[in-house]
Image (cartoon, rainbow, N blue to C red):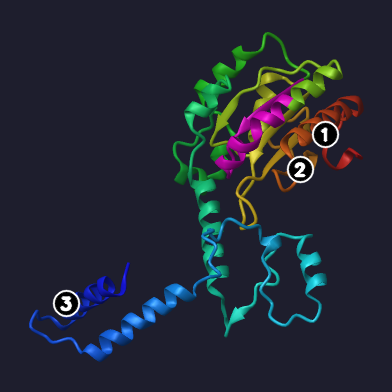
Amino acid sequence: MNEMQLKSIIEEVLKELNGSEETKVDDKNLQRITSQILHSESSDESYDGKSVTDYEMEDFFEVPNAENPDAYKNYKKSTPARVGIWRAGPRYKTDTYLRFRADHAVAQDAVFTDVPDEFVESKGWPKLQTLINDKDEYLTRPDLGRILDDESVAKLKTLNSKAPRVQVYVADGLSSTAIETNAYDALKAIEMGLKNHNIDMGTPFFVKYGRVPSMDHVSEITGAEVTAVLIGERPGLATGESMSCYMIYKGKVGTPESARTVISNIHKNGTPAVEAGAHIADILKKILDEKKSGVDLKL
């Protein structure tokens, strides 16, 4: 856009603000505004066209005149926490605030978005559901997310011809993004690892609106010796993709949380899904060998 075009646009805007087509625009002010805009456009050479989400927080450093910037940056590599971001008066700087809003939006999407039916169907997982009817109820009635509905109970009873030694399934939990990103790769790695240990695994399935204790109900219905659930973790500002695996030996409804063994932070910046799956398979074997889980199991 050249100077004449820009002047024309500014003149039209000023006329509209003054509420009259006949209003004469001060040439001096028009020139001043045009000059400021052109100077702003030409001086913005540092902008590289990237979004605030295109960088990792570990690489973002804005402390002016740091006494030891190299040590500060090295420290940042150990945590995704927002350190070294600086401020404008008592407030965050613009880039930091925008990144905060963007990461918060990712977390909200992970919680409020359902795992697509097409995704579940593409993996060949039978779809079950808890007593929950929608996302709002899921967030306000966690107790209903612990029990399968009648139709799902009937379907689950037909999936295996006999009680499996290990039953692994997937639940959406509090992050649909985590499931779409990690669940399939982790499940295939678990299946392969159990096969190498000569351990049979029951037919995997998906539970919509599932909470962690849904595994107790699943354990009772299937009669599995060990039950494991891959479930989306509550997302934070560091990532919306984190998944956990909870494991229990002979679970029953009402089993205390201390009886569960858990592997958490399964995502690309934590423990990658395939690596986590292989590790989970080894833990499942150890649970079977020692016939205990949770705080009683020493890893």
State which quarter of the image contains the N terminus: bottom left
Q: Label 1 belongs to which residue?
A: 279
For the point 71% across and 10% down, the residue is: 162
Query: Disc 2 or 3, which lies upstream in sequence?
Result: 3
Label 2: element kind:
loop
Asked if residue 172 is among those painted magenta in the image, a careful observer would answer: yes
Label 3: element kind:
helix
Position of residue 269 measured from the top left corner of the image (x, y, whole percent)? 72, 48
Q: Which residues are magenta?
A: 166-188
For the point 62% across and 49% down, the residue is: 234
- From this viewpoint, which residue is outermost toward the top? 161
For the point 68% across and 80% down, the residue is: 64
For the point 49% across and 38% down, the residue is: 114
Q: Which mark is residue 16?
A: 3
Q: Is residue 226 visible?
A: yes
Q: Residues within 10 Å of mark 2 (few under 14, many from 20)?
A: some
| 1 and 2 marks in contact (CB < 8 Å) | yes
The kind of residue on which mark 3 rests is Glu
The kind of residue on which mark 1 rests is His
Q: Label 2 belongs to which residue?
A: 271
> Which of label 1 and label 2 is nearer to you?
2
Position of residue 22 measured from the top left corner of the image (x, y, whole percent)? 7, 83
Asked if residue 12 is among those painted magenta in the image, a careful observer would answer: no
Label 1: element kind:
helix
The kind of residue on which mark 2 rests is Thr
Query: Disc 1 or 3, which lies upstream in sequence?
Result: 3
| 2 and 3 marks in contact (CB < 8 Å) | no
Position of residue 218 measured from the top left corner of the image (x, y, whole percent)? 65, 26
- From this viewpoint, which residue is outermost toward the left? 22
Position of residue 204 measured from the top left corner of the image (x, y, whole percent)? 65, 22
Q: CA distance from mark 2 to mark 3?
A: 58 Å
